[in-house]
Image (cartoon, rainbow, N blue to C red):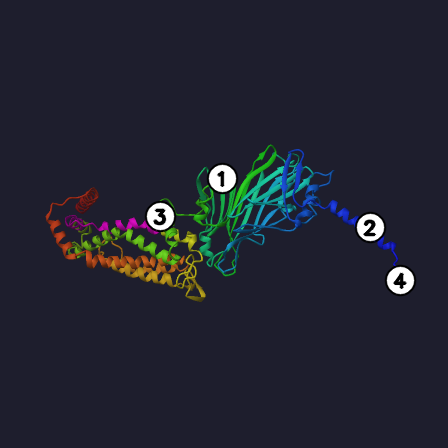
Amino acid sequence: MEENKIDPYQILGFVLLMTAFVWYIYTIPEPEKRIIENSKENLEISVQSDDSNLDSENKISKGLNLNDENSKPFVSSENKSKIKFDDVVIENDDLILKFNSKGGLLTEALLKNFTDFKGDPLYMIKDGNQNINLNFYSLNGQLINTSNYDFQPVVDKNYDGTKLSMILSISENQFLNFEYTLPKNGFMINFSIKSSGFRNVIDNQRAIQLNWDLKALRQAKSVEYENRYSQLYYQYEGDETNYLSSYSDSDKTENSVSWISYGQHFFNSILVLNNPTDEVVFESKKLFEDEGKDVLYTKNYISSIPLVLDKSELNSEMNLYIGPNDYDVLKNYDNNIYESIYFGWGIFGWINRFIYFPLFGFLSKYFSAGLAVIFMTIITRLAMSPVTYKTYVSQARMKVLRPEIAELNEKYKNDAVKKQQETMKLYNKAGANPLLGCVPALFQLPVFYALFCFFPIAFPLRGKSFLWADDLSSYDVIAELPFRIPWYGDHVSLLPILASIAIFFYTRMSSGAQMQSSQPGMPNMKFIMYLMPVMMLFFFNNYASAFSLYYFVSNIITILLMLTIKHFIINEEKILLQIQENKKKPSTQNRFQRKMQEMMDKAEEQRKLQNKR
């Protein structure tokens, strides 16, 4: 049997391996938590991360020097960190956020439960369209922009959410921290900027500016329509809100600003400041000239926000909302950020906020979005039916008086003032008033305008289909045109055509009971009858199809109500008898009629005096 021999080189190799293993065990960084301590401020940041961040944490604990011991901070490009860190991704139930160590920036924001108009994942931040940076001056007078420096990411996950600290280490006892805290769900991110040891770095005599620059990504089929409802809003002086024009480039400076909203029609980025700030500069720029399929951005929003030092250090707390411009979502957050939605001016906004939003929300729980629009239209028209009744009764009275009015026109055709006087006397005796046909219609204008503002901002309509319309918040398409018609577009929408037809028949029925164009002072109703449908056809072709659906159904219901009133409620023979009875009674004039009579009498006196001269 061959004798076994012991190789001394094997023994030596084994000893070296064991030594290396023991050294590795005792020198590996602790995987649970790290503490970064600043001796001046006694500031501690507890961090917890997975194995992929161990090497980064070890570098942080040792301190990442941006400058040599004998050089001043932020002097040249050589002082920038040479160490590059990987991107960091954090997420919750609603958002996926990606941060880059370069500048500590949020470089991607994906909304999990939404898609864009093409059906692709919806990004609000991507490919460098957003930049949030800090500008300040160093002691030697150099302007520093934090987006030029590399930050160290540190992730801390707990039961409340995820905290990401992006740390710019200047020296062992000097650093800047951009801290983002993302809760388990929701769209609001806690954002803070803190410094330590900066009293020996920052020139306190010059302002520190937080700059927020965003190019709004296109999210809708019609860029022009999206641009119309994409605006920079802000709140100032407590609860006052204002905005920059959505149609042209504009800028403004405001004091006591509480929040800034970069509206993107159905989506929004809102920076909420815990402490109102003065001398905030806003700017909004339009990024496209003409409607086109290759347009990528709609607006460029820019804000410059001064930050206040606390004992020569930065300690600014903010919140950043990135999510849908949905009233039902925004109203759950503080600071009234739902005011970034344009509900409409004055009473129109109140009608939307307290009537139509709750009503549509209730109906959409039980019906599809299209049916909810139809039922809301029916409820609105039934509520306005007394106004419709008053309007039609007034029109019926005017129709009965039409033969007598024609006689007066013929009798006094050469004397306009006398003709007007006799006409007013006839109205007074018959108990008729031509204005009564217009006044009830004026009461419908607030409802019409409120709905005109409601449908473009009704987020629950976005992406909801009905019949051939694949998105009620945008226009429906039944045909694509190979060319573009000014004011009309490059497509044909069916719902605006149906709405225009309904408007035509409604206008024809209404004008049939009105005075003809031969009556002095009355507009040419035949011209209006044909003009209004054409105007609506062009206007609504690029508008939300839900509004065209509402207008079509509304006019159909109004026509049915008018036919019902005409054939089953109002008897024109009875109206004629009532007018004859009114003529026998002593005429009484209200205040308005007396004033009109006085004006006509004065005009008649002036006419007679002029004739004598």
**C-alpha span from label 4 to label 3:** 100 Å
**SS at badge 3:** helix
- Residue farthest left in this picture: 584
Q: Are marks 4 and 1 in contact (CB under 8 Å)?
A: no
Q: Earlier in the sequence, mark 1 or mark 3?
A: 1
Q: Which circle, 1 or 3, is nearer the viewer?
A: 3
Q: Earlier in the sequence, mark 2 or mark 3?
A: 2
**Is 433 colored magenta in this rendering?**
yes
**C-alpha span from label 1 to label 3:** 30 Å
- Asked if one can make out residue 396 in the rendered structure from this viewpoint, the answer is yes
**SS at badge 1:** strand
Magenta stretch in the rendered image: 423-448
Type of the residue with mark 4: Glu
Q: Earlier in the sequence, mark 2 or mark 4?
A: 4
Residue that mark 4 sits on: 2
Residue that mark 3 sits on: 355
Q: Which circle, 4 or 3, is nearer the viewer?
A: 4
Q: Residues within 10 Å of mark 4 (few under 14, many from 20)?
A: few
Type of the residue with mark 3: Ile
Q: Which circle, 1 or 2, is nearer the viewer?
A: 2
Residue at image point 21% right, 53% down: 393
Quadrant position of the N terminus in the picture: bottom right
Type of the residue with mark 1: Val
Q: Which mark is residue 448?
A: none
Where is residue 475 drawn, in percent x and y? 42, 60
**SS at badge 2:** helix
Q: Is residue 102 above or below residue 203?
A: below
Q: Which circle, 2 or 4, is nearer the viewer?
A: 4
Residue that mark 1 sits on: 257
Q: Residues within 10 Å of mark 1 (few under 14, many from 20)?
A: many
Q: Are marks 1 and 2 in contact (CB under 8 Å)?
A: no
